[in-house]
Image (cartoon, grey):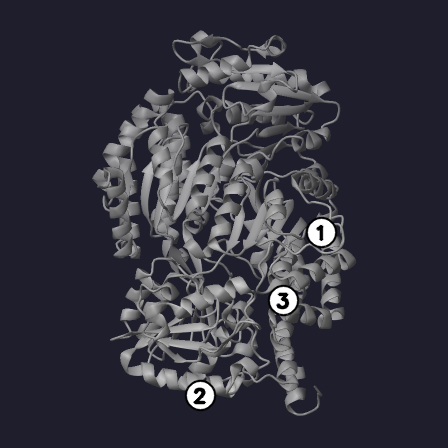
């Protein structure tokens, strides 16, 4: 997927260029500039200003790249980013403070603490579906932790990539924060370099390449991937509210092209019809009779993904299961909200992450069987959702479903809770961020032990005698009674 | 047709899937069984360590048996607390929602341990993995064969065979294990092999913890204080170099940095202490481990082959190839570009590098890759602060050596080339857990503006809501704010 070459003569960004960029950032980092509290504050304030002064331009770029409705751009990209900056500005002092650690009798007298320090020069590789949020939210974390940063936005959202490059250069400290635009060749050049941390948001295939490249330099990574996030819908719930919340998390989030979008639904055979009817009703209320005319839906990002989704819809045993929607406009890259009922479990649409406006509903006899279905699907998704009023079901869900994050009775909103770590497990990723977790993701937590010169346990040193062994046993156990007894025994031996 | 290795792993996966390792009572019973294993087999453990490494019982207790007992006991006392979900704060906007973070086991984990502390480095991670509710395959190092055999034979007698397995073998077994899919890999060893482990893990997107090594320096700034402090400093340096497995430890002091004018005082103190602890010469050497095998012995001997390096020896230098013993050796200012100053020594050779001013030690350390530990013997608070803020290492220990290993509340791990991830105490539990975010909402109240069709009013409402500007929201709803 090569980027269209613009008229200007762009110098080729190869491994040499990447090496130079890293060297420049490392030289900046070594001066200690990014470590200072003042630098971090000015950068975050500058980013806030950048977002405030360029909202229309950001909205326009997102409209170009994704036909993203202004509402979504304004809230999920700009507002959430601003919140992130504000939280970091408010809490950073607290995050930067060393954390006291307890010490025990075994090392008495001593004191200990854990000091956060920046990792150094970090690489953030972002995705195309939330180009601003997924680029700059990690950058907020990296700045607050005191690092120098290279950001590589996705080439599949070119207007956003170009705007991000311009804004970052205009507002932030370019001796410490740089944007490198480009596609596979540029990303590969960057991945050859030695980074102190890499945060990658994207798909499983590229994640493997990123981690393999990181392995050469022993670089730790955070991988924010995806998966098939299921929604279990029980009966005896407020169906209208549940339906609306599923719609908001599915089509209200970039038309289903979001890592935490509900991917498919599991409900009971008895409830399925009611659910489908509720969807039909609410979807029309939200998007009108002809969703392709609605201004409140993103389009499909490009023809590759349009074709991919079409293939999922057109598969023989699947196309007959459409119960709502199905309209397409290839020229405008639009697909209407489409619901399928009871597609075969081994169909393509049930095997890969959909990442689009298609919603299969799978039915089971009893709602408890949903858990088996989720477990048998193999991978652990980034999110899992359950709508129910049944306490037992909630408990089973929370205890047995393995996913990055779970939400009961809503979808997607857990992103807004900064006290919750956001990340995956298994194939949905490793590591997490958001809020303080972003600061932690880009920090090294250095253990520090302070000892004095008194209290030198002669037992540590040779000559090693059986008596020392007994005393040592007592000392290591940390039990004061044991220590006193052993000491008394030593004195009277 | 599955190999026996694949069958074992399939069994581990089945056990995990069926919830065999989930309950707290199972985890506690395993930990108690491990404690029993250690308590009932102390003598065999001492014997195996003597056989493989020449460790004396006190060293074995101090560095392996005692550490493990402490770790199990601590874990048993904290387990219920660690397993409990932790409440997370929810903004008023979502009232009455609740949020929490719940630790969950990762699944089937692979632990590679190293030969120098064959029990601690195998069983301490095992304690973490079990406490977090995982099934485990432990692959001890075959370079400590008696210890490996002990583990292979004894663990099945005490622990749940369906959930904890030990596999004997060398590098080839390790390679085969790395081809398979794990939910976590915990590796202790060299950076070279660490790279291979991470590259293999990348294929399956398996998270890893790498506990590697590096050149851990000791900055010495306390010799001009009282004689007693100088003596203690010397003891702690000697204890931190030759005490742990004769320097074959990731947290052993690799080299010393001291001011020129104090070098001879330091060397004299070190010599006296070495003689007192370990004997007058190589013939009367005692209370010290030996080199693990011929390969490591040869590697260390080769470090001294360079004539410039050999010339810098000021104490020791004798070797006994038959017994695989190298006596404690001190070098004064070997060439900085020699191998002994560029590679991790991992043996009983201690270079002392002199500087005009002790503050230069910071730049010196920064010119090398991040070590696992920086030891600094100093009472100068300003210098301490500088060391903390201007260097980067896994840990910093002031005025002592090795003891940070005993602190359960401090994370133990590296940074940069010394590794990533950490363990000990609760960090062991965390390293083998996935912290799952959970949010509970009720059906009421509803935040209507979330839903299309979207209007300017809804946008403004949500903007205020997202900023948690509740006052602004009230104004908006009362009609006092305009879109």
Q: Mark 3 lies on which chain?
A: A
Mark 1 vs mark 3, CA separation in Å:
24 Å
Disc number for residue A65: 3
Task: Quickly name the residue at label 2.
Answer: A281
Count of marks placed on residues: 3
Front label number (1 vs 3): 3
Whichever of labels 3 and 2 marks the residue nearer the N terminus, that label is 3
Which residue sits at x=66%, y=82%? B460
Front label number (2 vs 1): 2
Q: Residues within 10 Å of mark 2 (few under 14, many from 20)?
A: some
Residue A112 falls left or right of residue A17: left
Q: Position of residue B360 (x, y in %)?
A: 72, 29
Q: Which chain carries label 1?
A: A
Q: Position of residue A316 (x, y in %)?
A: 34, 69
Whichever of labels 1 and 3 marks the residue nearer the N terminus, that label is 3
Q: Which chain carries label 2?
A: A
Circle 3 — which element? helix
Disc number for residue A177: 1
Which residue sits at x=25%, y=56%? B18
Disc number for residue B69: none
Q: Where is residue A179 in the image (x, y as percent from the top left)?
A: 69, 53
Front label number (3 vs 2): 3
Determine whether A432 is above or below A363 in the image.
above
| Residue in front for this viewpoint, B403 or A6 | A6
Q: Where is residue A124 in the image (x, y as percent from the top left)?
A: 61, 52
Circle 1 — which element? strand
Determine whether B209 is above or below A153 in the image.
above
Residue B128 falls left or right of residue A136: left
């Amino acid at each position: 997927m090569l980027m269209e070459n613009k008229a200007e003569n762009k110098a080729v960004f190869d491994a040499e260029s990447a090496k130079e960029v890293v060297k420049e950032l490392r030289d900046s980092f070594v001066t200690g500039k990014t470590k200072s509290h003042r630098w971090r504050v000015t950068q975050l304030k500058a980013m806030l200003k950048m977002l405030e002064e360029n909202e229309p331009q950001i909205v326009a770029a997102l409209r170009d790249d994704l036909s993203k409705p202004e509402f979504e751009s304004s809230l999920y990209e700009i507002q959430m980013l601003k919140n992130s900056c504000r939280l970091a500005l408010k809490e950073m002092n607290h995050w930067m403070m060393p954390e006291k650690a307890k010490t025990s009798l075994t090392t008495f007298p001593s004191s200990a603490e854990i000091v956060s320090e920046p990792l150094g020069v970090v690489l953030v590789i972002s995705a195309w579906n939330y180009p601003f949020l997924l680029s700059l939210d990690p950058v907020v974390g990296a700045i607050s932790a005191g690092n120098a940063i290279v950001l590589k936005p996705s080439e599949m959202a070119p207007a956003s990539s170009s705007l991000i490059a311009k804004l970052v250069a205009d507002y932030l400290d370019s001796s410490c924060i740089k944007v490198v635009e480009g596609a596979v060749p540029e990303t590969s050049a960057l991945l050859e370099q030695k980074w102190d941390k890499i945060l990658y948001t994207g798909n499983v295939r590229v994640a493997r390449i990123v981690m393999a490249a990181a392995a050469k330099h022993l670089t730790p990574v955070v991988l924010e991937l995806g998966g098939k996030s299921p929604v279990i819908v029980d009966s005896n719930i407020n169906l209208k509210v549940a339906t609306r919340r599923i719609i908001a998390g599915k089509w209200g989030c970039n038309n289903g092209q979001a890592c935490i979008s509900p991917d498919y639904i599991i409900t009971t055979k008895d409830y399925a019809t009611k659910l489908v009817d509720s969807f039909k009703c609410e979807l029309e209320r939200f998007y009108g009779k002809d969703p392709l005319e609605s201004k409140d839906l993103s389009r499909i990002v490009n023809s590759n993904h349009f074709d991919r989704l079409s293939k999922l819809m057109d598969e023989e045993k699947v196309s007959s299961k459409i119960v709502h929607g199905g309209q397409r406009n290839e020229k405008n890259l639009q697909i209407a909200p489409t619901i399928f009922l009871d597609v075969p479990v081994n169909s393509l649409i049930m095997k890969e992450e959909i990442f689009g406006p298609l919603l299969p509903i799978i039915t089971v006899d009893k709602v408890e069987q949903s858990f088996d279905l989720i477990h048998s699907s193999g991978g652990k998704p980034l999110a899992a959702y359950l709508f129910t009023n049944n306490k037992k079901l909630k408990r089973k869900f929370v205890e047995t479903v393995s996913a990055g994050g779970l939400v009961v009775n809503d979808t997607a909103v857990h992103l807004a809770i900064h006290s919750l770590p956001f990340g995956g497990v298994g194939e949905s990723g490793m590591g997490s961020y958001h809020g303080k977790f972003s600061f932690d993701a880009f920090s090294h937590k250095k253990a520090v032990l302070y000892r004095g010169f008194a209290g030198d346990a002669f037992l540590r040193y040779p000559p090693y005698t059986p008596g020392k062994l007994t005393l040592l046993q007592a000392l290591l156990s940390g039990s004061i009674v044991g220590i006193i007894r052993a000491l008394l025994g030593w004195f009277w031996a | 047709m599955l190999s026996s290795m694949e069958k074992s792993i399939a069994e581990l996966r089945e056990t995990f899937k069926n919830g065999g390792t989930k309950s707290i009572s199972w985890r506690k019973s395993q930990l108690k069984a491990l404690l029993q294993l250690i308590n009932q087999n102390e003598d065999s453990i001492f014997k195996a360590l003597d056989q493989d490494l020449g460790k004396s019982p006190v060293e074995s207790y101090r560095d392996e048996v005692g550490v493990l007992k402490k770790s199990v006991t601590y874990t048993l006392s904290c387990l219920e607390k660690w397993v409990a979900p932790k409440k997370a704060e929810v903004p008023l906007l979502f009232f009455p929602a609740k949020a929490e973070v719940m630790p969950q086991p990762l699944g089937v984990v692979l632990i590679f341990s190293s030969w120098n502390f064959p029990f601690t480095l195998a069983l301490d991670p095992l304690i973490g993995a079990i406490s977090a509710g995982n099934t485990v395959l432990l692959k001890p190092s075959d370079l400590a064969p008696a210890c490996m055999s002990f583990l292979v034979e004894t663990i099945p007698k005490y622990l749940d065979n369906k959930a904890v397995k030990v596999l004997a073998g060398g590098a080839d077994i390790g390679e085969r294990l790395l081809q398979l899919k794990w939910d976590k890999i915990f590796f202790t060893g060299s950076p070279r092999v660490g790279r291979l482990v991470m590259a293999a893990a990348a294929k399956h997107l398996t998270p890893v913890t790498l506990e590697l090594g590096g050149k851990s320096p000791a900055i010495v700034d306390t010799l001009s204080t009282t004689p007693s402090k100088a003596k203690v400093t010397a003891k702690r340096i000697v204890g931190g170099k030759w005490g742990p497995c004769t320097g074959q430890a990731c947290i052993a002091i690799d080299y010393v940095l001291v001011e020129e004018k104090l070098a001879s005082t330091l060397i004299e103190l070190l010599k006296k202490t070495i003689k007192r602890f370990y004997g007058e010469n190589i013939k009367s050497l005692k209370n010290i481990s030996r080199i693990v095998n011929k390969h490591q012995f040869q590697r260390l001997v080769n470090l001294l082959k360079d004539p410039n390096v050999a010339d810098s020896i000021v104490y020791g230098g004798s070797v006994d190839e038959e017994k695989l013993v190298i006596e404690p050796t001190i070098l004064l200012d070997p060439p900085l570009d020699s191998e002994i100053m560029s590679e991790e020594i991992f043996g009983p050779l201690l270079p002392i590098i002199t500087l005009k001013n002790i503050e230069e030690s910071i730049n010196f350390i920064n010119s090398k890759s991040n070590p696992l530990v920086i030891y600094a013997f100093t009472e100068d608070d300003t210098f301490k602060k500088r060391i903390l803020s201007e260097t980067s290492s896994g840990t910093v220990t002031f005025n002592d050596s090795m003891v940070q290993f005993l602190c359960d509340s401090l994370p133990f791990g590296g940074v940069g080339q010394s590794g990533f991830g950490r363990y000990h105490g609760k960090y062991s539990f965390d390293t083998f857990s996935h912290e799952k975010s959970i949010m509970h909402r009720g059906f009421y109240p509803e935040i209507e503006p979330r839903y299309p069709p979207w209007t300017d009013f809804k946008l403004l409402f949500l903007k205020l809501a997202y900023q948690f500007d509740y006052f602004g929201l009230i104004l908006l709803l009362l009609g006092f704010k305009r879109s």
